[in-house]
């Protein structure tokens, strides 16, 4: 199915793909974005990649709508679903269970698995970031093992601590900042996932992969110390 | 060197063009609600159009300038005084050290702007001086101003060329306004009756309106024909229709992505008129083509550039280094 090109007001346009959550569609979106970025087209001011749309923001004083439309039509004709860019895998250390994972017991009940089996299943995949939204740095991840799917809490918490890692239905993800929410919290990362004063306030962007690495209490403390001293080096893997 | 706040007014915040480069990371854009009014205020005092200004709502602040400075107020209309003498909107004034500016309650319109020569100085956070009230970041310590705050100004200058000519007529705010819109990305899913109803009926601005969005009430719009949507990017002025059928216009502090169908998007040229609406005012929407919308936007920008050029030309009587610097800066923009 060829994507359609639909204006969103007079300074943005959606390139719209098939209406489903699908890693192939997501990689086509990313390939389109990186093609357009490489061409460095005057007048395009930004991109927002979502599940099935690439929104292109533009300045109509610098590029006309017919001109932009023809570029987008041409570039979205033959989109490869293969990844031409390197795969970026961002490793997030997580202390599972205990005080930081108060809902682990709910996942155990739902999945009939032990907590160590749950930790193994949760920390094995490379989760694709389909898009960021809802909160700064909040990633919509794909790839949760079906056995871990668990409905949200019946009574949402008023406060979820930053760094909390949770499960909601078939989704998993982490809270970069404090927020209310109904996710089942199974662990916490000692990393600060949102650093507003840094040149790059976020460790990851849409199209990257997240890999959770299970750590112990003493590792958590050591990493937390390094984070506070601004000495922590995040592990980012590049795969061709 | 700056501004001391004597009375805070309502929701007085530092804003600029917004945090444009982090929407894809899930961080709200923010920035001025009425960008046209803020741009105008900056041009009047000899700044670049997008420098940081103070935005206020409902009741303006009272403040004291701790150094001589040129200032202008634009946007919503209030009765304002400089040392007890009434002053006008859309006009540059010079204030001396310790002068007191009192901006009263808004008589019409909702958001007012104070620009000072040099621009408001706060440390940029994520490439912008805008205040994000939601995340307590940027602007002045991430919050609205309160009594006793001291706000810095970037090297204020006390002389702008042709001060008395730096004024433009104040446009009145109508009670019943028509806002031009283009078809939204999901308008195809609404049936023709719903679309006709959207552009023929009267909507009312609800009390539930803030910097994030404006809720409208009227006859509800049926969304049963719209398929379930996956979240996608939002834009300023998009009119989305949730299941209850009452449209919401998303504004400066909007969430970065949304999953409600967008029936129409406010034309850039009319955003200013829209955000200045107060609760209980009526509003109509008129559908125009994208070509027309962009044409109107171009005319608006051309008008602003003419104004900037006029102010600059008047400056040519004597060579002002600041004007030269500004021109050079523009070349590299």
Image (cartoon, rainbow, N blue to C red):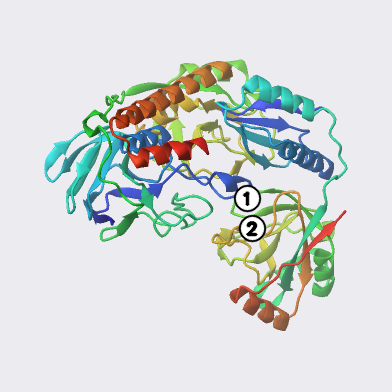
| Mark 2 neighbour density, 10 Å: few (under 14) some (14–19) many (20 or more) | some
Q: Position of residue B330 (x, y in %)?
A: 47, 36
**In the image: residue B101, left or right of residue B265:** left
In the rendering, at what x and y percent does residue B6 appear?
22, 55
Identify the element where label 2 is drawn: loop
Residue at point 54%, 47% (across, down): B28
| Front residue (pair A114, B313) | B313
Which of the 4 image quarters holds residue B50? Answer: top left
- Residue at label 2? A202
Q: Residue B25, labelled with which disc?
A: 1
Which residue in the rendered view is the most extreme toward the left? B84
For residue B215, say whether it is visible.
yes
Which one is nearer the viewer's eye here, B20 or B330?
B330
Relative to B169, residue B229 above or below: below
Say which residue appears at 19% left-offset and 40% top-offset.
Answer: B80
B204 left or right of A83? left
- Rendered residue at 27%/42% (across/down): B71
Q: Is residue B291 above or below residue B55?
A: above
Q: Quadrant of residue B303?
A: top left
Q: Is residue B223 above or below residue B23?
A: above
User: Do pointers 1 and 2 mark residues of a single chain?
Assistant: no
The location of residue B11, given as percent across then percent down, is 34, 49
Label 1 sits on a secondary structure element that is helix
What distance separates the C-alpha of mark 1 from that of mark 2?
Answer: 8 Å
Residue B207 visible here: no
Residue B278 spot, x, y in % from top left: 34, 34
């Amino acid at each position: 199915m060829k994507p359609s090109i639909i204006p969103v007001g007079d300074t943005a346009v959606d390139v719209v793909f098939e209406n489903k959550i699908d890693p192939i569609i997501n990689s086509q979106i990313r390939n389109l974005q990186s093609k357009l970025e490489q061409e460095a087209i005057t007048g395009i001011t930004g991109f927002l990649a979502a599940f099935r749309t690439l929104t292109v923001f533009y300045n109509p004083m610098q590029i006309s709508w017919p001109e932009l439309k023809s570029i987008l039509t041409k570039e979205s004709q033959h989109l490869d679903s293969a990844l031409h860019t390197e795969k970026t895998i961002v490793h997030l250390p997580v202390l599972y269970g205990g005080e930081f994972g108060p809902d682990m017991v709910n996942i155990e009940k739902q999945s009939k698995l032990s907590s160590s089996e749950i930790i193994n299943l949760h920390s094995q995949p490379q989760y694709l970031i389909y898009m960021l939204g809802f909160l700064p740095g909040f990633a919509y991840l794909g790839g949760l093992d079906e056995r871990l799917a668990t409905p949200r809490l019946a009574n949402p918490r008023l406060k979820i601590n930053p760094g909390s890692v949770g499960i909601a239905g078939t989704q998993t993800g982490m809270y970069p900042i404090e927020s209310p929410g109904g996710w089942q919290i199974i662990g916490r990362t000692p990393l600060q996932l949102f650093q507003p004063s840094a040149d790059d306030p976020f460790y990851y962007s849409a199209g990257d992969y997240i890999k959770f690495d299970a750590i112990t209490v003493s590792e958590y403390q050591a990493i937390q110390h390094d984070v506070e001293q601004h000495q922590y080096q995040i592990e980012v893997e590049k795969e061709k | 060197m700056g501004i001391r706040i004597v009375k805070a007014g309502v929701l007085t915040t530092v804003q600029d063009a917004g945090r444009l480069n982090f929407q894809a990371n899930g961080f709200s854009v923010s920035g001025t609600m009425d960008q046209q009014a803020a741009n105008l205020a900056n041009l009047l005092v000899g700044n670049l159009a997008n420098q940081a200004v103070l935005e206020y709502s409902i009741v303006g602040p009272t403040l004291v300038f701790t150094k001589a400075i040129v200032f202008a107020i634009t946007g919503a209309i209030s009765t304002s005084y400089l040392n007890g003498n009434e002053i006008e909107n859309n006009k540059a004034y010079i204030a001396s050290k310790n002068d007191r500016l009192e901006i009263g309650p808004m008589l019409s319109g909702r958001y007012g702007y104070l620009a000072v020569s040099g621009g408001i100085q706060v440390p940029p956070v994520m490439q912008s001086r805008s205040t994000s009230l939601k995340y307590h970041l940027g602007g002045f310590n991430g919050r609205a101003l309160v009594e006793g705050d001291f706000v810095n100004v970037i090297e204020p200058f006390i002389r702008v060329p042709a001060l008395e000519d730096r004024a433009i007529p104040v446009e009145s705010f109508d009670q019943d306004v028509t806002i031009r819109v283009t078809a939204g990305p999901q308008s195809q899913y609404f049936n023709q009756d719903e679309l006709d109803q959207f552009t023929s009926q009267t909507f009312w601005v609800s009390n539930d309106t803030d910097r994030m969005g404006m809720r409208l009430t009227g006859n509800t719009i049926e969304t049963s024909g719209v398929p379930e949507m996956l979240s996608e990017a939002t834009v300023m002025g998009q009119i989305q229709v949730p299941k209850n059928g009452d449209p919401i216009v998303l504004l400066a502090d909007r969430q970065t992505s949304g999953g409600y169908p967008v029936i129409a998007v406010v034309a850039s040229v009319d955003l200013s008129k829209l955000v200045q609406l107060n609760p209980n005012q009526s509003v109509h929407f008129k559908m125009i083509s994208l070509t027309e919308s962009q044409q109107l936007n171009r005319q608006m920008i051309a008008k602003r550039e003419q104004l900037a050029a006029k102010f600059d030309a008047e400056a040519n009587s004597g060579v002002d280094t600041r004007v030269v610097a500004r021109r050079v800066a523009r070349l590299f923009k």
